[in-house]
Image (cartoon, grey):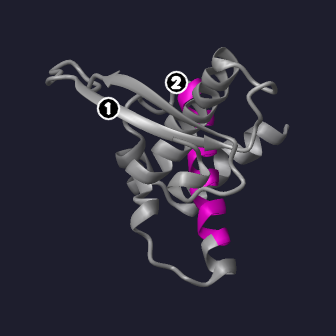
């Protein structure tokens, strides 16, 4: 089936990727089997299967890193703020909180798997400490 046949005009390829996902943690449940579909405007001769898989893996590296934490810890996808400037400011604050947590975690001052509880205990004065120390 071509991209045009499924309503994706301007795309030159549709890729189906089958993946098996295992739940994180020590009490792992059953793995899920998923098929994900991607559309691209790259021509067939611009990227072969390996290059497309590399692009997709790169996307998921970002998604599983910053975006996943932003959604799970801060429930960003549930935020209903509709004003563009306010949404941008909230995203900036979330990124700042993640950055501060990472600074403290690298120094051994924040437990590895405790970002949600660490963020709930953080206040303005506490947030300034790693920023001041980092600038010296």
Q: Quadrant location of the C terminus?
A: top right
Of 29 and 112, nearer the camera is 29
Looking at this view, name the residue that lies furthest to the right: 136
Looking at this view, name the residue that lies furthest to the top: 50
Instruction: Please tell me whether residue 70 is drawn above or below residue 111 in the rendered image.
Output: below
Residue for badge 2: 108
Of 73 and 78, nearer the camera is 78
Looking at this view, name the residue that lies furthest to the bottom: 83
Q: Residue at x 18, y 21 (%)?
A: 28
Of 26 and 98, nearer the camera is 26
Q: Residue at x 59, y 48 (%)?
A: 3
Q: Which residues are magenta?
A: 88-106
State the image coordinates of residue 75 (x, y, percent, origin top left): 40, 59
Mark closest to the chain's N terminus, 1 or 2? 1
| In the image: residue 108, left or right of residue 40 | left
Q: Nearer the viewer, mark 1 or mark 2?
A: 1
* Magenta span contains residue 7: no
State the image coordinates of residue 50 (x, y, percent, origin top left): 65, 15
Instruction: Please tell me whether residue 40 is drawn above or below residue 112 in the rendered image.
Output: below
Tag 2: Cα neighbours inside 10 Å, few (<14), some, or many (≥20)? few
Q: Which mark, by number, is residue 34?
A: 1
Of 119 and 27, nearer the camera is 27
Q: Is residue 41 visible?
A: yes
């Amino acid at each position: 089936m071509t991209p045009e046949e499924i309503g994706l005009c301007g795309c030159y390829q549709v890729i189906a990727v089958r993946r098996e996902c295992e739940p994180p943690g020590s009490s792992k449940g059953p793995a899920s089997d998923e098929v994900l579909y991607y559309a691209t405007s790259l021509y067939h001769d611009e990227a072969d299967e390996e290059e497309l898989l590399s692009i997709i893996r790169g996307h998921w590296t970002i998604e599983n890193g910053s975006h996943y934490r932003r959604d799970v810890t801060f429930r960003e996808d549930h935020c209903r703020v509709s004003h563009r400037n306010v949404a941008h400011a909230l995203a900036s604050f979330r990124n700042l909180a993640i950055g501060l947590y990472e600074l403290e975690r690298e120094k051994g001052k924040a437990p590895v798997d405790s970002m949600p509880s660490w963020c709930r205990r953080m206040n303005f004065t506490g947030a300034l400490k790693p920023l001041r120390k980092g600038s010296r």
